[in-house]
Amino acid sequence: MDEVINCVKIKTTEVTDEFVKDFTKTILEKAKENLKKDKFLASVAFFMCKSQVYILPTPIDNEQSKLVIEAFITKMTKKLQPEAIIFLSDGWSISASNKEDLKLPPSKHPERKECIALSTITKAHKSWGLLQFYTRENDEIQFGENVETSENFCRFIDDAFVEPLSKKVH
């Protein structure tokens, strides 16, 4: 995977939880604009450092590409040492009212809802997520409910901040 990523300067000296949440909401608004215009949304990882945000396109087409992206996000986390990671994706969500609902992946579930998903985790392991539900009607995007949660939906960004245990040789 190519390590060329875009970088955006931000005006802050401290990346606080509130700053990250506000930045996440700004990303959501831009994602909504792009989805409405283009009718699709590419997944993207944002690495928030003290004075800049590194933006990495993360095309996930199948399980193999997901594994490659997971490894690359971990590698970039170690390299950039970000204060927070925000992962933007387009996907499906379900309301799991019972265990039977969890037998099918959301993309195959008959009651699935299409959504923009933003998953965020900070260096201090504080996480949250945003879901923006939408429907497609006559080739138009109609936005619905927006849900904020206290957890992220993308488990592999959690793992990016976990340092592997080093083996000591005596």
Image (cartoon, rainbow, N blue to C red):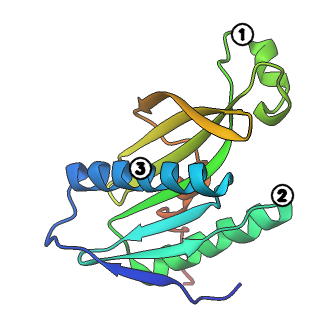
81 lies above or below 41: below
Q: Secondary structure at mark 1?
A: loop
Q: Nearer the viewer, residue 90 or 31?
A: 31
As measured in the structure, the alpha-carbon distance from the residue carrying label 2 to the one carrying label 1 is: 26 Å
Q: In the rendering, which numbered label is found on residue 63?
A: 2
As measured in the structure, the alpha-carbon distance from the residue carrying label 3 to the one carrying label 1 is: 32 Å
Residue 87, percent from left and from top:
52, 57
As measured in the structure, the alpha-carbon distance from the residue carrying label 3 to the one carrying label 2 is: 28 Å
Q: Quadrant of the C terminus?
A: bottom right
Q: Secondary structure at mark 2?
A: helix
User: Which amino acid is tagged 1?
Assistant: Asn
Q: Which residue is mark 3?
A: 29
Upstream in the sequence, badge 3 or badge 1?
A: 3
Q: Residues within 10 Å of mark 1 (few under 14, many from 20)?
A: few
Residue name at image x 53 percent, y 65 percent: 45
Residue 74, percent from left and from top:
57, 71
Mark 2–mark 1 CB contact (< 8 Å)? no
Upstream in the sequence, badge 3 or badge 2?
A: 3
Report which quarter residue 50 is drawn in: bottom left
Q: Which residue is mark 1?
A: 98
Q: Quadrant of the N terminus?
A: bottom right
Q: Nearer the viewer, residue 68 or 27?
A: 27
